[in-house]
Amino acid sequence: MTPPGLLAGVAALVAVGGSILLVRPAVRRTGLGVVHPAIAWIALHAVFFAAGAALLSSVGAAEPGLAWYVALTALATALGVAASDRLARRRGASAPDRPGAVGPATPDGARVRPAVVVALLGIALAAVAPGLIATGLPLLADDPTGARAELAGLAVQPLRVALPGAVVVVVLAALRRPTRTRIAAAGASVMIALAFTLLLASRYLAAELVATLVVAWLLAGRRIDTRAVAALALGGVIVFGAIQVVRAPGQSSGRELAFAAERTVSRVVLVQPRTLDALMDAIPAETPFFGGLTWLRRAAPLVGRDDVPNLGYWIYPRIFPDQDPGVIGYAAPGLIGEAWANFGAAGLTLFVALGILLERLGGLLAGRRTGTADIAAGAVAIVVLARTHALGLNGTLVLMALVVAWRVLGGRDAGSLIREAGLVLRWRA
């Protein structure tokens, strides 16, 4: 007889494949290919949840319910995409014309306002400046992890939109009117921005920047050589591992390579499934479902719940019980963890809604792949929604609101965008 954990682990992996099959019609209709928001989300779900959940459940390190829930969230999201795509087809939405690659001859359908883009980046940098003044650049500090903790919360959110958005604008400007000066400026802007995120000792800011650039490049109709993808992946793993060593010099001293490998596997493949498993163990066995109150914690006492915690801080000691009690750690529950903590299995409906949102975003972007502002904002939006493996509902809503604000303020032709968004919301596009 097949062990239940192994069966659940296989189901998690099969669900990823099934999800890809379910979203293929939407991907084909929009012509977005691998950068369709649904494909981006499924890819990260496979890496950050399905692989780890399958492994932990198969070896008995987690209950089979973990892998089953991970499998069902993938399928629920894909079903939302498929249902939304089918409705759009019924209402007459057709495949848009496939634009060629953005280049010298491509008209800019949504130009940017350079001064506004620069101003928005300046505002984002000003928001994190007090933390940097107080602690210095985290990567160069004596305690990088402690210094990095100062750069969290709402203050850093504008930077997650404005920095990659500005860099994409510079890169697209070089593609449209390529000269040595513009190409050099684009390359320099990418390297400076990447160096800045690394000096912040931030894994996710650097990863989001690179991911946004790749998505924007593909949205613009450009291709990436397979060898370049392999080089990017290898470079990302090396940089990620190096940051782990720098952020924990005491733990890595004398065994830097082994520590980097162990920490990379743990942080990429295992930490999210372990976080979800800990939440599923504790809720509802020890604590009742929160019924949506984790998103409105300040209002919880009004309905008689005084026990609504910040899930990330609350669950951390359960994942790392041997950690020094004086260390305040945070484990991002992501949307999947929040869905379980609030509603249990009923939280799967959130992923159906997420699937609908992913498909509608794809419908909007399919017809707006030549405008600089549209490509930049669209690439950031795709990365934000794909990152719901670590972003909760409130964080996602804040970042999406910032993306919309960046696009409206930093780009021209907002009227055309609003009209097309209306068609998308009526499933006419």
Image (tube, rainbow, N blue to C red):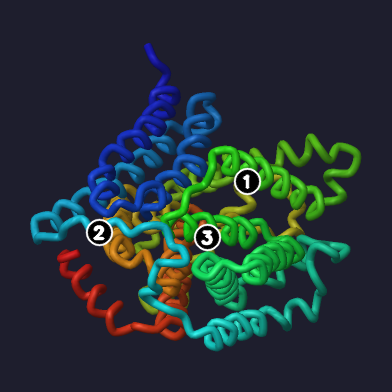
Circles 2, 1 touching at the beta carbon (< 8 Å): no
The residue shown at (78%, 55%) is 247
Query: Is residue 94 rendered to the left or right of residue 227?
Result: left
- As drawn, the residue found furthest toward the right would be 254
Badge nearest the viewer, 2 or 1: 2
Q: Which residue is mark 3?
A: 212
Element marked by disc 3: helix
User: How many neighbours does mark 2 have within 10 angstroms: few (below 14), some (14-19), or many (20 or more)?
Assistant: few
Viewer-closest of 124 and 327: 124
Q: Which residue is mark 1?
A: 232
Question: As shown in the figure, which amino acid type bears the numbered disc 3?
Answer: Thr
Say if residue 391 shows up in the picture: yes
- For the C terminus, the image quarter is bottom left
Place of residue 400 in the rendered image (x, y in percent of width and height, measured from the top left): 42, 71
Question: As shown in the figure, which amino acid type bears the numbered disc 1?
Answer: Leu
Question: As shown in the figure, which amino acid type bears the numbered disc 2?
Answer: Asp
